[in-house]
Amino acid sequence: MPVYEYRCADCNAVSSRLVYSWSSSSPVECRQCGGSDLSRLMSGFAIRKSWGDSLNWVPSRETSSDVDENNPASISRYMGRVKREMGGQTTPDFDQMRREIGGGSGESRE
């Protein structure tokens, strides 16, 4: 359902309206002054990927083929490759864990 923004010609106030149907167009009134001379504005919008989309990502075979889970430096390098494959978008917790495992900054060994 879209949200439309309107500017009142009388008081210059901007108000939003949630539209429940594409076909119905009931009159819009200004919430500030009650005026009916409103013009629809071009609104900004955002697109956010769903949380479930991120679950479909898995590291490539090349990324995980040489990991020695008994070697902290190897795990840190692996985490760096995972970070690169994810486009560098990881949480601060991920970076902190990498520093703790690798014993260093975690950023320099990507």
Image (tube, rainbow, N blue to C red):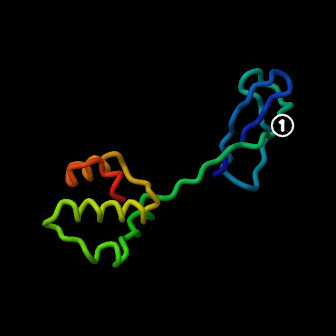
Residue at 37% across, 75% down: 60
In the rendered image of this protein, does residue 110 appear above or below residue 26?
below
Is 30 on the left or on the right of 52, as rendered?
A: right
Residue at the spot of label 1: 39
Is 44 on the left or on the right of 97, as rendered?
A: right
Residue at 46% across, 60% down: 87
In the rendered image, residue 55, in percent from the top left (x then y), is placed at: 38, 65
In the rendered image, residue 51, in percent from the top left (x then y), is placed at: 43, 58
Nearest to the observer: residue 98 or residue 55: 98
Is 64 on the left or on the right of 43, as rendered?
A: left
Quadrant occupied by the C terminus: bottom left
In the rendered image, residue 59, in percent from the top left (x then y), is placed at: 36, 71
Nearest to the observer: residue 86 or residue 39: 86
In the rendered image of this protein, does residue 44 appear above or below residue 80?
above
Residue at 29% across, 73% down: 64
Q: Amino acid at mark 1?
A: Ser
